[in-house]
Image (tube, helix red, strand yellow):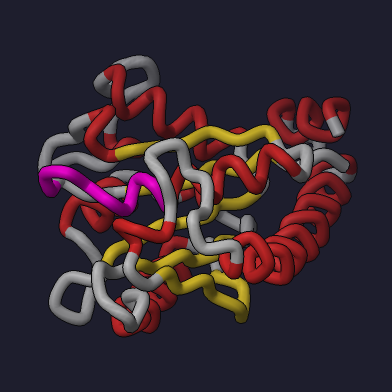
Amino acid sequence: MSINTTVIYGSARRARQGLKAARFVVNKLEDRGHTVTLIDSEAHELPMLDRMYKEYDEGEAPEAMETIASALRSADGFVVVAAEYNHSIPAALKNLLDHFQKEYLYKPSAIVTYSAGPFGGVRALVNLRAILAELGTPSIPSAFPVSMVGRSFDDDGNATDESYDKRIVRFLDEYEWYAHALKHARVAEACGSDIPTQQAMCRGA
């Protein structure tokens, strides 16, 4: 089965260096044959959370919310790219994640953290794992910390440190295992369902 992956990146700071890491992940997933969508919080500018997507009547949600919801629904899994702000994740990323709920269910996530210094944002990792589990997209055991993010990739997402090209392989191997396993389970459930939307998923598998 082919894999559709949504890469989620959230930061509102000027001269955002983490976008380089997000583009690196997109490039590597595409090299492996994934269909990839990058969701960047700055491109959609969601308001601070007031009403979740599910709280709107069908067709009434803002366009930006509909666009993100569509990408999340069609995904087989997610790679979340997060900076570390004061031992946690950026407010822009948390706000983006919290607008949605059922779109994440029964799909795996994988975590990329980054920092401008040597520790790769790993102190945000534990916090983010708890958030993703609560949203229904449990993260894979491995993580991918990125140190010195500003000089580890160029603006197009190419690694300037070849060690990242090597390290990403095992990380994405593991993510793909979980993405395939959970997709098989979702398709099997859909094929035994009499719900029209589930039947459509079965036919499209």
Tell me which corner region of the image, top left, top right, bottom left or bottom right, holds residue 152. bottom left
In percent of width and height, residue 179 lies at 73, 56
Which residue is at a point 77% across and 51% down the rendered structure image? 183
In percent of width and height, residue 30 lies at 68, 38
Which residue is at a point 49% across and 66% down the rendered structure image? 111
Q: Which stretch is magenta?
A: 13-21
Could you tell me which quadrant the N terminus lies in? Answer: top right
Is residue 49 visible in the rendered image? The answer is: no
In percent of width and height, residue 127 lies at 32, 78
Tell me which corner region of the image, top left, top right, bottom left or bottom right, holds residue 120. bottom left
From what the image shows, is residue 156 above or below residue 129? Answer: above
Q: Nearer the viewer, residue 52 or 46?
A: 46
Q: Nearer the viewer, residue 10 or 160?
A: 160
Could you tell me which quadrant the C terminus lies in? Answer: top right
Tell me which corner region of the image, top left, top right, bottom left or bottom right, holds residue 119. bottom left
In percent of width and height, residue 193 lies at 81, 41
Which residue is at a point 47% across and 43% down the rendered structure image? 157
Left or right of 6: which side holds 189?
right
Is residue 191 visible in the rendered image? The answer is: yes
Which residue is at a point 60% across and 35% down the rendered structure image? 36
Q: Nearer the viewer, residue 198 or 82?
A: 82
Question: How many marks do you count on the picture?
Answer: 0
Left or right of 101: which side holds 88?
left
Task: Decide whether residue 130 is among the magenta residues.
Answer: no
Task: Decide whether residue 15 is among the magenta residues.
Answer: yes
From what the image shows, is residue 181 above or below residue 63? Answer: below
Left or right of 127: which side holds 170?
right
